[in-house]
Amino acid sequence: VQLVESGGGLVQPGGSLSLSCAASGSFEMINAMGWYRQAPGKQRESVATITSRASTNYADSVKGRFTISRDNAKNTVYLQMNSLKPEDTAVYYCHAGVVVDDLGYEYDYWGQGTQVTVSS
């Protein structure tokens, strides 16, 4: 199973960016998907998660600014980021809980990370 992220880059404060993450490979199903971020010198933190039934959860710091969504047919999760702030600068990682076979065990998979920089 591979998670391939796209999007990210440099944006001015107040701007918007969109991230996407597509899962590929052989598996039975994907449960929760989400976005995490890690800023220099800080621990990785959860930004937003979404279950297979589209129930979402957001970090307080991004509520009202970020929107997570997913397309189950495409095995893809998205993160729309609006009103970006310098403190949103970090490497953003995609995560998926994947059931790889009919035994039903779930495994964690991570994307390679994509840099988001918010600066004027």
Image (cartoon, helix red, strand yellow):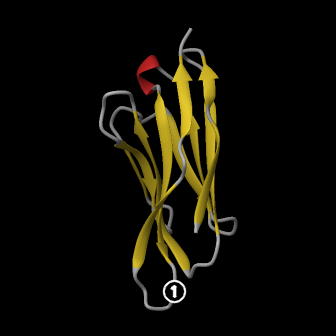
Kindly identify the amino acid type of the residue bearing the numbered disc 1: Asp
Report which residue position mark 1 lands on: 101
Q: How crowded is mark 1: few (under 14 residues within 10 Å), some or many (20 or more)?
A: few
From the image, which quarter does the N terminus lie in?
bottom right
Work out whether 25 lies above or below 15.
Answer: below
Question: Could you say whether the residue bearing mark 1 is in a helix, strand or loop?
Answer: loop
Q: In which quarter of the image is residue 27?
A: bottom right
Work out whether 111 lies above or below 74.
Answer: above
Foreground of the two, 78 or 56:
78
Q: Is residue 13 visible?
A: yes
Residue 94 at x, y percent in the picture: 51, 51
Task: Residue at 56%, 8% (x, y): give it.
Answer: 120
**Left or right: where does residue 31 sit relative to residue 76?**
left
**Left or right: where does residue 36 sit relative to residue 113?**
left
Q: Is residue 16 visible?
A: no
Foreground of the two, 97 or 13:
97
